[in-house]
Amino acid sequence: MISGIRVGSLVSSIRLFSTCKVNFTKIPSTLPSKGLISLKNNSNFLKISGKDASIFINGLTTIKLLPQHLKKNQTTISNADINNENIVNSIQLSNDLINNSNWGILHENEEFDPTNEDELPMRLGIRRDGRYSNILRANGRIFSDVFIYPTPFLGNNDEFPSYLIEILNKSQFKPLLMMLKLHKLRANVEISEINNIDSWFYYDDASEGNEIYDSLLDQYFANANSKDIGSSKTLSELFIKNKVLFDFDIDPNSILGLAIDQRNDYFGIRILMNEGSVPQIHNISEKDILPYENYTNRRIKYGIVETSDFANASILPFECNLDWMHGINYDKGCYIGQELTIRTWTGNGATRRVLPIIFNEEIKGLNDSYEKLELKAIVGNEEVEEKTKEEEKPVYNPFGKPSSSSSSSRPRRDVSKVGEVLINNGKEGLAKVEKRYFDWDNEESKQVNVVHDGKLYNATINTNVWN
């Protein structure tokens, strides 16, 4: 509970924290055990509402918003196919309700096995808490990572669905808004920019905080308990009434959206409030209001990358661990960028990923947490050299050797470069790593060299946060 705090002075101090620029800054290496962080100046919001809102968003994002199952093999019927049909049929949501009510959002947890009948109830549910996803370009590259919230949190009596889209990559907000309006065509939706929202991130690593996190997923926002609109609304109201997270003084109508940030277990909770409102949370006092850099530091510790960590790069969703962060459903059908994404998933998978890296020694003179640092293979790594030689073997040309006028002399690839650090707090960071050097499917950690000012420093790539 935030006790004895004047909301006006608190908001002023938070805005002072939030005005810090993301680039050219130093992220602290230590992180308090709990905190409430304003994300206001680092997110943009769109509101999409109307009878076709659910269908429209479903065709743009990597997550499933409509209860449907598409068979991958059209010539056979497996037990998994039958179970998946039963899962869809367990959801009490007609087309009329999808178009003519503020019904909420569909949650599908693909970690539960469709061949195991005991796990089927936990796989699909209708809920009022938001979801993480990606919006892709037509070429399969990421436009932006987003959170999608049914709004308001407790619902209303509107005769159409309504959603808030939190755009995590601010630099892509205007192009994304333009793209959405181009794709609207005859869809019965309204797309508007929303500026009067305060976005908050809350976390608590104490046992009490973990118990709250577990109770949300096991009771109030559990797919098994929420199969229809009435159940999802009742559970959301009980969550407020039972003071699970918020203090009793909070106005439930001030909560525009809420999401359990499940990009990694126990990472935190996102809360959308009316502008100027501060979430009244148990055991959170004024001293627990933290600068934005602590959110970035927590992402580093939990291995969570956002597209804003890249400098205008063309990024594929699996490079950003979209699958590991529960941001994709594989049987939802068509959406923008789906073809390349599914081809990557069913093929050889990603050739590079963003992974946690720990600096084994101090990197001297490292003052900018966003400075890109090259990763170099440890000298004498024969396996890497062999993989690279295999990749660079010339392809057979049935038309003979190209003429000298058409041939080009490409610079020889630097075999030793195996990735780069995107962001760091001086002791650890997030690094884009090539699979030819570190096989994350079969390895848990590996030594690597980090280059800074022409000097090599030893570091360890580690995937413990994902195991």
Image (spheres, grey):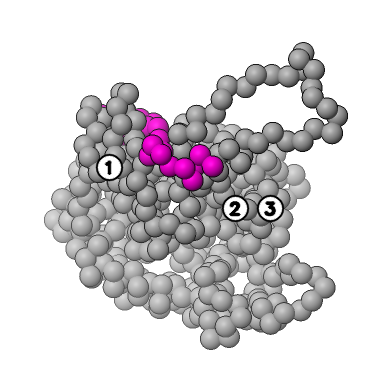
The answer to which of marks 3 and 2 sits earlier in the sequence is: 3
Q: Residues within 10 Å of mark 2 (few under 14, many from 20)?
A: few
Q: Residue at x 29, y 65 (%)?
A: 246
Residue on which disc 3 sits: 343
Question: Which kind of residue does numbered mark 1 sit on?
Answer: Phe
Q: Return the residue nearer the eye: 249 or 204.
A: 204
The answer to which of marks 2 and 1 sits earlier in the sequence is: 2
Q: Residues within 10 Å of mark 1 (few under 14, many from 20)?
A: many
Question: Which kind of residue does numbered mark 2 sit on?
Answer: Gly
**Relative to 377, does residue 151 appear above or below in the rendering?**
below
Residue 55: where, in percent of width, then height? 68, 58
Query: Quick one: SS at disc 2?
Result: loop
Residue on which disc 1 sits: 359
Residue farthest bottom in this picture: 118
Question: Which kind of residue does numbered mark 3 sit on?
Answer: Arg
Q: Residue at x 71, y 50 (%)?
A: 339
Q: Return the residue nearer the eye: 325 or 281.
A: 325
Whether the magenta-drawn stretch holds residue 55 is answered as no
Label total for image: 3
Query: Quick one: SS at disc 1?
Result: strand
**Relative to 414, does residue 3 appear above or below in the rendering?**
below
Residue 298: where, in percent of width, then height? 31, 50
Quadrant assignment, res 449: top left
Residue 305: where, in percent of width, then height? 43, 46
- The numbered dot on residue 326 is none
Residue 366: where, in percent of width, then height? 26, 30
Q: Are marks 3 and 2 in contact (CB under 8 Å)?
A: no
Residue on which disc 2 sits: 349
* Residues drawn in magenta: 367-386
